Amino acid sequence: MSDTDNSQSESSVEEATKKRKRGVRNDENYQRNVIKKSRVQGKAYVNYKGNAVAARQLGDGCRCPMKYFEKLNDDKKIELLNRFHSLNSKDDQDIYLQGLLEVVDVKRRSKLQNPENANEKTCSFHHYVPIDGKRRKVCQKAFLSLFSVEENNMLIRQHIESFPVKETHYSNKTYLYLDAKLNMKIMFDMFKVKYPTTKIRYSYFVKYFHEHFDLHFGRPQVDTCCKCEELDLKIKSPSLGDASKRAAAAELAVHKRRAKKFYWSLKQSTDECKIRDDLAVITFDYMQNLHLPEVPVQDLFYLTQLTVNIFGIHNCKTDKAFFYVYHEGITSKGPNDVCSFLWDYIQREIPENVQELRLYSDNCPGQNKNHTMVRMCAALDSKKLNNFFLSEGIPSCLMTEILVSSNGV
């Protein structure tokens, strides 16, 4: 090769390396990539705070009667650890470990006093390690020690799963809620008290919670179902016997089933009215009273405030709400007022081609479930009417939530 060819190749290399004004980009030397690669390979590194982190090593041996950890010689242990650290990424390592786990049913359960209050274990795991082309069963402690896996994630999961959860009462989709008094900070502080030697950051605790759990935090309950509260107190009462508690639990299950049946009927009617022109479905209820004026002045605490009533009607076909707002000086909240609002709304908003009308409301006898409502429905002789009521005791605030979530007035 001539000198001219050498000079041309050197110039082409220089042009390729001078694409960026600030120098040649080298991703491998970036601090975050060095730390990430070192953690995957189990090597020592310096973290973002400038502190030295030691290389990963084999953990302590297990204390189980089978002595799985002691039965393996040191060469096999190091071979397993090196094979694990030779994988390219953290995702590959997780997939590799998942392939060494086997899910089995729980063979034996302990007899608990109140099994309905306990978090029942649904499955167990068997741990295996590949030795000479075969899968050898080991205990959990030996499995974690052989692959130098920390127990932090397992401790976080066990801690979060130790909190009792509640299911939604009336929604068609099941949601799980933690207690309203809890939040992420309280749960993290309780974790640090429970495991003081475990080094877990709050940001990692929150990230693990959102990535591995579909849980919501409940809100303080207002206008709750009196029937549910009464039966819950009976179930939790230490003075009642097991037979009385079982009867209360059965009654509570029937009560919740009736509530779900009501909202399932409402959902079916809503879907049906959107495809039928001759069907209209409306829900109606009084919202929470407003007290005026609402200012933090000391003298107003000794005066009677003006109460403003809000009666809402939600059209399930158009998904729009209509509100009647008036203060207590105009009229009250009796059956005549409710029927007047419904009559006005039906005459103004319900089309003439509608032949069937379905009304959904709460079970308040002084407003909705009375002879006045029956006579008003009889006056609408040109339409077929079906009136659906919530079960006794179910809070009417659920109907209010339907009104508030509407699009428009």
Image: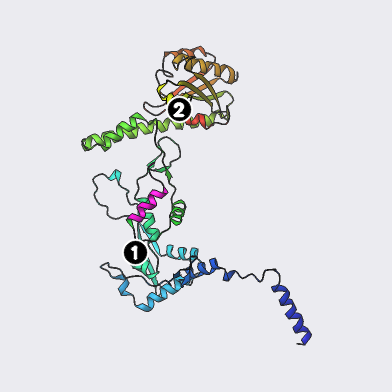
Q: Is residue 138 shown above or below 185?
A: below
Q: Position of residue 323 (x, y in %)?
A: 53, 23
* Residues at circles 2 and 1 in contact by the CB criterion of under 8 Å: no
Q: Position of residue 311 (x, y in %)?
A: 49, 22
Q: Nearer the viewer, residue 397 or 291?
A: 291
In screen coordinates, is 120 left or right of 404? Answer: left
* Frontmost residue, 81 versus 381: 81
Is residue 332 depicted above or below 66 in this figure? above
Q: Residue furthest bottom?
A: 2
- The percent position of residue 385, horizontal first and vertical second, equals 49, 19
SS label for mark 1: helix
Q: Please give the residue where the numbered disc 1 appears in the rendered image.
A: 140
Would residue 261 be found to the left or right of residue 245 on screen?
right
Residue 373: tell me if it is visible. Answer: no
**What is the number of the mark on residue 349?**
none
For the residue marked with disc 1, what is the amino acid?
Gln
* Residue at the extreme right of the image, as rendered: 4
Residue 271 placed where, x, y %?
A: 53, 32
Which residues are the magenta region? Answer: 178-193
Give the SS element for disc 2: loop
Residue at x 37% of width, y 66% of height: 144
- Mark 2 residue crowding within 10 angstroms, few (<14) / some (14–19) / many (20+): few
Quadrant for residue 408, please give it.
Answer: top right
